[in-house]
Image: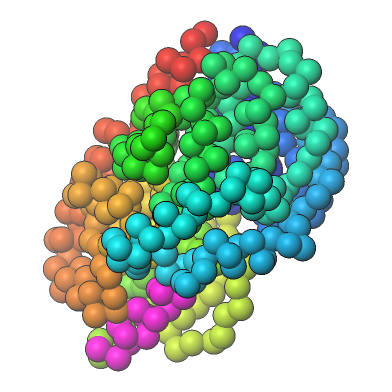
Amino acid sequence: MRIALVVQRYGADLLGGAERHAALMAGLLARHHEVEVLTTTAGDYQSWSPAYPAGESRVAGVLVRRFPVEVGRSPDWPALSDRLHRGFAASDFARLTPAERDAFSARVRAWPQPLQEEFIRGQGPIAPALIDHLARGGYDRFLFVTYLYPTTYDGLAVVDADRARVVPTLHDEPAAYLPVFGQRFARSTLLCSTEAEVRLVARLYPDRPPAARLLGYGVAPPTDAPSDPDRSRPFLLYAGRIDPQKGIEELLSWYRVLRRIDPHPPRLVLTGETSMPLSAEPGVETRGFVDDDEKLHLMRRALALVHPSPFESLGIVLLEALAVRTPVIVNARCEVLVEHCRRGRSGLWVRDGAELGAAVRRLRTTPQLRDDLGAAGRAYVEREYSLAAYERALLREFPA
């Protein structure tokens, strides 16, 4: 079977969750099928500026075809984004009351289709040669990764949707409420990472809900390492993109409260690509990008991984932390992350700085709780997110 996997950007050095999910699927499917990754030359997810040459290459043994970006982010897109988020900041969407959320949904549903599509295409990337390549055919099945970008929206329009699968990485975020997404997904099948994402699909597109079922994800837990003696000086770890959309501003405000109420506050260590201005703050250490080995080393030493994002469809870094027996503290407004904590009995969820302080106090004063949460988290990953089970799920969608 010849499979085209379509994703907006692709590369071993890219850290986005959708891109990492795409690479995992490409590698597993390539064991059984002829897989081609169709992507753009972009490296940056905002400007879509080129980072790779156009043409063919191989990444981890998989054929990758890169197509040039003719239009990155449109100059008009900020105005469109402001119009979508009228009355609230994008990062505050999770705090809207049910009545405010209903009013927002009704307002967005009233947008004419051309305006909705202008928003989708305005954020980029526009790569006409990629869409033309898809339209020429030659593939038995199509796999699109992440719902948000025109590589998926326009790509689905030129292929046989009955032979298409979409891994939407769908978040409960403002853009997901645009009705045209539900209309475009109607004939394809959505493969979701969590049960919460499956429920979100039905909630967002009730008039004509797309077919959606659970695919999951696969994690290979690393070999256990001996306990690190430096745990006597614990710290909180954030690993991921340092961006307002990931809840970083909220995390920093929580941490300031924690420092006021805790006489011996742990450090907060931030790792990952920085895409927002940061000022020096007491107790906060920003390390920028770290490789996988250093990330796992930090996770093992941390008191907990803190995942403040209100918008997640899976939370790969959370699963990685659980796999090395590190408990997690998550944003209580994110249904997906709270579901992991509940199902795995592996973490705590908080809404503000006072609750973060209480969670830290429990973990520091009750070492057995930290150990129990960590052991339960490792068991949860092995039980529900094993690579073998994930590969079997993929092959049910793309039989060998």
Q: Nearer the viewer, residue 264 or 118?
A: 118
Q: Position of residue 104 (x, y in %)?
A: 42, 60
Taking the spot 61% from the left edge, 22% from the top edge, the residue there is: 142
Image label count: 0
Residue drawn at point x = 41 percent, y = 31 percent: 208
The picture places residue 324, in percent across and down from the top left corner, at 35, 49
Q: Nearer the viewer, residue 168 or 63?
A: 168
Quadrant for the N terminus, please. Answer: top right
Quadrant in the rendering for residue 206:
top left
Determine whether, in the image, residue 353 is placed left or right of residue 19.
Answer: left
User: As drawn, is 315 to the left or to the right of 90?
Assistant: left
Residue at x 30% of width, y 63% of height: 99
Q: Quadrant of residue 304?
A: bottom left
Decide whether the magenta segment is chiefly helix, strand or loop: helix
Q: Nearer the viewer, residue 198 or 294?
A: 198
Visible in this render: residue 121?
Answer: yes
**Which residue occupies the foreground of this view, 397 or 80?**
80
How was this image coloured? rainbow
Residue 350 belongs to magenta span: no
The correct choice, above or below, for 382 with respect to 300 in the image is above
Q: What segment carries the magenta color?
A: 249-261
- Residue 82 image point, x, y percent: 59, 67
Q: Does 1 sit left or right of 366 as displayed?
A: right
Q: Determine if residue 364 is in view.
A: no
- Give the image location of residue 122, x and y in percent: 70, 53
Is residue 253 located in the magenta-colored stretch of the structure?
yes
Q: Is 116 placed above or below 303 here? A: above
Q: Residue at x 40, y 73 (%)?
A: 251
Residue 393 in which image quadrant: top left
